[in-house]
Image (cartoon, coloured by chain):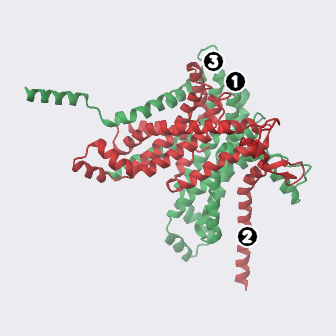
Chain colours: A red, B green
C-alpha cells in the first residue's frame, strides 16, 4: 500500500515536470505562431480577439496591402535562396579537396591548418566581420551580394571542411588500395570509388552549409545592410514595427531548418551544431 | 638518346613534384588566411591604433571608461546562463539515462527542437514571448501568479538568460546524454547493489565518469554565448547595461569607430581565452590521436 502511494507520488512529480518542460519548450513557439495569425490582439486579452491568415497572404505576395510595414517577402526569400545555392557550390568545391587532404594525408604544419579551421568555433566571429567591413568597403564589396556570399562561405566553410574530412576518414583506405592494385589511377579511384562512398556525408555537409547560409545574421548585418536584404535581415527590420510580419518570416525561416536537420540527424555531431545560428 | 630523354624527364618530374595535398588544401587555406587569419590579426592590431593612426592605448582607456559595465554584464550573463544550462541539462540527461519509459522517449524527440532553430528566430520568439504584453505574462496573469498591471519586465538580464538557456539546454543535453549512454549499466547496477542511493549513483558514478562530455558542453555553450549578437541585439538592444556584441555594432553603425570596436572585440576574445585554448587543444589532440591510432 505504502509502496504504491510512493510510486503514484513519483509518477505525479514526473508528469508535472514533463508538462512544465513541454510548456517551456513549446511556449515561445506558440507565441510566434499566435502572433503570425493575430489580426487583432488587444491587451490584456490572453488570446487574440480575431485571427486569420491575412498577414501570411500579404507576406507571401498573395494579397497586396497599403498598411504600414506590409511587405512581400518573396524577393528576400528568392535572394536568400540564390545566395545559399551559390555558397553551397563554392564552399563544397573548396571544402571537398581540403577535407580529403586532411583525412588522407599526413600533413606537415597539420596542427596549424587544423587551428585555422577550428578558430572560428573557438572565438567570437563578430570582430572578424567588423574588420572585413573595412576591407570590403575599400574593395567595393560591402553592401553587395558578392560580399555577402563571401561572408557566408567563410561561415559555412568550417563546417564543410570538418564534415567532409570526417566522411573521407570513415572510408577504409583498403578499398582505394584495391582499386590501385588492379590498375586504376588516382583520379579514377577518387571519382569511381571514394566519391560515391562519401556521397551521403558530402550531401549532409552541403545541407549544413545551405542552412547556415539561409540563417546567417551577424555577417550579413555588417556587410550586407542596408542594400542586401536576405530573409533574416527582413525579419530583423520588420520586428521593430510589425510583430505579425516578423513572426510570419520567423516561422518561414524555421521550417527548412527543422526539416533539413531532422533529415541529417544521423550524421549530427555536437561540435557542428555548436556553431548554428 | 631515348634513354637519356626518359632519364631527363624523370629528373624533371622529380624536381617539379609537389605533394598532392598542397594543391588540395591551397584554395581552402588561402581563403581562410585572407578571410579569417588576416581580419583576426588586424582586429588585435587595430585595437592599439588611435584615430590619428598612431600606436596608443587610447582605445583601451575609452573602452574601460565607457563599457566596463557592459563587459561585466556580458561575463555575468554568460556565466549565469552557462551554469543554469549545465545544471538543468545534467539533471535532464540523468533522467533520460536512468528512466526508460514511453514518456522519457517522447521527451527525447521534443527536447531537440530548439537546437535547429536559428538564433534570429529565437530572438524573435523571445521578443514576443517575454514582452510585458507577451504570452508569458498574459498566461501567468491568467493563472493568478502575477498582477497584469505589473507584468514581469524581462527585456534584461533575466530575459536574456531565459533565451540563452532555452536555446542551449537541448544542445547541452545532446552532448551530455551522449556521454551517459556510453556508461555501461553494470556500473550503475554495481553501485546500487552496494547500497548506493539515487543521489550517490548520480554524484559518484554518472557525473565523474562523464566529466569530459560535461566539460565540452560547458565550453561550447560558454564560448557561443559570449559571441552571440542576435539575441541581445533584438531583445535588449541599446539599453544599459547591454552586451559587448551590441556595443560593437553601435560603435560601428553610429560612429564608424573601428578602434574601440576592435578593443571591445579583444575583450570578448579575452573572455573566451580559457575555453578557446581548451577547445583547440582537445580538438587537435582528438584528431591527431585518432590518426596515430590508425597507423
Q: CA distance from mark 3 to mark 2?
A: 60 Å
Determine whether, in the image, residue B133 is placed left or right of residue A211.
Answer: right
Q: Which residue was labeled with disc 1?
A: B62
Foreground: B108 or B49? B108
Foreground: A277 or B41? A277
First in residue order: circle 3 vs circle 1:
3
Please determine whether, in this image, residue B88 is positioned above or below residue B157.
Answer: below
Residue A13's disc number: 2
Please determine whether, in this image, residue A78 is positioned above or below residue A202.
Answer: above
Please determine whether, in this image, residue B57 is positioned above or below residue A16.
Answer: above
Pointer 2 local density, CA inside 10 Å: few below 14, some 14–19, many at least 20 = few
Q: Which residue was labeled with disc 3?
A: B50
Pointer 3 local density, CA inside 10 Å: few below 14, some 14–19, many at least 20 = some
Q: Residue at x 41, y 39 (%)?
A: A98
The chain under label 3 reads B
The chain under label 2 reads A
Determine whether, in the image, residue B47 is placed left or right of residue A35.
Answer: left
Q: Residue at x 73, y 45 (%)?
A: A248
Amino acid at each position: 500500500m505504502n509502496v504504491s502511494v510512493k510510486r503514484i507520488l513519483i509518477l505525479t512529480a514526473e508528469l508535472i515536470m514533463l508538462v512544465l518542460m513541454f510548456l517551456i519548450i513549446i511556449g515561445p513557439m506558440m507565441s510566434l505562431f499566435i502572433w503570425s495569425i493575430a489580426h487583432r490582439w488587444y491587451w490584456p486579452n490572453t488570446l487574440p480577439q480575431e485571427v486569420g491568415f491575412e498577414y501570411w497572404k500579404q507576406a507571401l505576395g498573395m494579397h497586396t496591402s497599403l498598411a504600414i510595414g506590409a511587405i512581400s517577402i518573396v524577393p528576400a526569400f528568392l535572394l536568400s535562396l540564390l545566395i545559399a545555392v551559390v555558397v553551397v557550390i563554392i564552399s563544397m568545391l573548396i571544402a571537398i579537396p581540403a577535407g580529403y587532404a586532411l583525412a588522407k594525408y599526413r600533413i606537415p604544419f597539420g596542427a596549424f591548418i587544423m587551428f585555422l579551421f577550428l578558430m572560428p568555433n573557438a572565438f567570437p566571429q563578430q570582430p572578424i566581420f567588423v574588420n572585413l567591413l573595412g576591407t570590403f568597403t575599400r574593395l567595393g564589396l560591402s553592401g553587395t551580394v558578392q560580399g555577402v556570399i563571401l561572408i557566408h562561405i567563410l561561415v559555412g566553410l568550417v563546417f564543410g571542411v570538418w564534415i567532409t574530412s570526417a566522411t573521407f576518414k570513415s572510408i577504409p583506405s583498403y578499398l582505394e588500395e584495391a582499386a590501385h592494385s588492379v590498375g586504376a589511377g588516382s583520379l579514377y579511384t577518387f571519382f569511381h570509388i571514394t566519391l560515391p562512398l562519401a556521397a551521403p556525408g558530402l550531401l549532409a555537409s552541403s545541407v549544413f552549409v545551405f542552412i547556415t547560409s539561409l540563417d546567417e545574421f551577424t555577417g550579413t548585418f555588417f556587410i550586407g545592410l542596408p542594400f542586401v536584404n536576405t530573409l533574416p535581415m527582413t525579419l530583423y527590420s520588420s520586428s521593430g514595427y510589425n510583430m505579425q510580419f516578423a513572426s510570419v518570416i520567423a516561422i518561414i525561416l524555421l521550417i527548412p531548418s527543422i526539416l533539413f536537420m531532422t533529415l541529417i540527424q544521423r550524421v549530427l555531431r555536437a561540435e557542428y551544431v555548436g556553431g548554428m545560428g | 638518346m631515348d634513354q637519356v630523354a626518359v632519364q631527363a624527364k624523370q629528373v624533371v618530374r622529380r624536381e617539379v613534384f609537389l605533394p598532392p595535398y598542397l594543391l588540395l588544401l591551397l584554395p581552402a587555406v588561402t581563403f581562410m588566411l585572407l578571410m579569417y587569419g588576416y581580419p583576426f590579426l588586424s582586429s588585435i592590431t587595430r585595437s592599439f591604433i588611435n584615430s590619428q593612426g598612431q600606436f596608443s592605448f587610447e582605445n583601451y582607456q575609452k573602452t574601460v571608461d565607457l563599457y566596463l559595465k557592459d563587459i561585466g554584464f556580458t561575463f555575468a550573463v554568460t556565466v549565469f546562463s552557462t551554469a543554469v544550462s549545465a545544471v538543468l541539462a545534467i539533471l535532464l540527461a540523468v533522467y533520460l539515462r536512468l528512466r526508460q519509459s514511453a514518456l522519457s522517449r517522447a521527451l527525447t524527440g521534443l527536447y531537440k527542437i530548439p537546437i535547429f532553430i536559428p538564433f534570429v528566430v529565437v530572438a524573435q520568439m523571445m521578443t514576443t514571448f517575454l514582452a510585458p504584453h507577451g504570452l508569458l505574462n498574459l498566461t501567468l496573469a491568467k493563472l493568478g501568479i502575477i498582477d497584469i498591471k505589473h507584468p514581469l519586465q524581462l527585456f534584461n538580464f533575466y530575459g536574456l538568460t531565459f533565451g540563452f538557456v532555452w536555446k542551449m539546454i537541448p544542445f547541452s543535453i545532446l552532448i551530455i546524454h551522449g556521454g551517459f549512454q556510453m556508461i555501461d549499466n553494470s556500473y550503475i547496477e554495481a553501485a546500487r547493489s552496494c547500497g548506493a542511493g539515487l543521489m550517490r549513483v548520480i554524484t559518484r558514478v554518472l557525473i565523474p565518469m562523464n566529466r569530459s562530455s560535461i566539460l565540452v558542453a560547458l565550453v561550447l555553450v560558454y564560448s557561443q554565448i559570449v559571441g552571440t549578437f542576435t539575441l541581445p541585439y533584438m531583445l535588449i538592444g541599446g539599453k544599459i547595461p547591454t552586451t559587448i556584441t551590441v556595443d560593437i555594432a553601435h560603435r560601428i553603425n553610429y560612429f564608424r569607430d573601428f578602434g574601440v570596436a576592435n578593443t571591445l572585440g579583444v575583450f570578448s576574445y579575452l573572455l573566451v581565452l580559457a575555453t578557446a585554448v581548451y577547445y583547440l587543444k582537445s580538438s587537435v589532440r582528438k584528431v591527431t590521436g585518432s590518426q596515430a591510432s590508425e597507423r
